[in-house]
Amino acid sequence: MVRVFARFRKWFVARPARPAAPSGHGRPAQHNVFEAAATYVAASVEDDWDRIDEVAGWVAPDALVFGINELACRAVIALARERNEPVEAVARGLLGLPGAEPSRPI
C-alpha cells in the first residue's frame, strides 16, 4: 500500500488533468472520481502503467487523491469490522507498523 501511494505522489506531483477521451457519441466520457480511484489502485496493484496513464486523465489530480484516500479509509474500516479489531490496529498492521496488535474491538 505504501508503494502505491509513493508511486502516486511521484506520478502526480505537477501533472495537470488531461481532457477525457471522447466516447462513441461525440461527447467526452464522464468519469466519477471514485471510479477513477478504484481503477487507479487496481492498475497500480497490477503494475499496468498504460491503464494508470489513462486513468490519470479522467479527473484532476487532487480529485484522484481524494478518491484514493476515501477508498483507503473505507477499505480499512471494512477490514476492521470483518476482523472485529480497532481501525487503527488494522491500519498499522497493513503498513507493518508497531502497535498493530488488536487491543479492543470496534
Image (cartoon, rainbow, N blue to C red):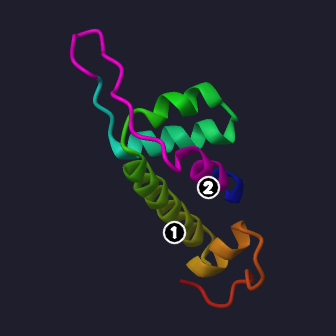
Badge 1 density bin: few <14, some 14–19, many ≥20, Cα 10 Å: some
State the residue position of label 2. 5
Circle 2 or circle 1, nearest the eye: 2
Q: Is residue 43 left or right of residue 39?
A: right
Residue identified by numbered label 1? 77
Residue 25 picture quarter: top left
The disc label shown at residue 37, or none: none
- Please tell me which residue is depicted at 66% across the width and 55% down the height of the picture: 6
Residue in the foreground of this view, choosing between 12 and 103: 12
Furthest toward the front, the residue is 14
- Above or below, 54 against 67 in this view is above
Q: Amino acid at mark 1?
A: Ile
Residue 14 against residue 105 in the figure, above or below: above
Residue 11 image position (x, y, % from top left): 58, 44
User: What is the quadrant of the N terminus in the image?
Assistant: bottom right
- In magenta segment, residue 19: yes
Q: Secondary structure at mark 1?
A: helix
Q: Amino acid at mark 2?
A: Phe
Q: Residue at x 70, y 35 (%)?
A: 47
Pointer 2: residues within 10 angstroms few (<14), some, or many (20+)? some
Which residue is located at x 58 percent, y 49 percent? 8
> Does 66 sit left or right of 95 as displayed?
left
Determine the residue positioned at 50% across, 37% down. Answer: 39
Give the mark nearer the N terminus: 2 vs 1: 2
What secondary structure prevails in the magenta region?
A: loop
Q: Position of residue 97 (x, y in %)?
A: 75, 76
What x and y, as percent, mark residue 94?
70, 66
Q: Start and end of the magenta stretch?
A: 5-28
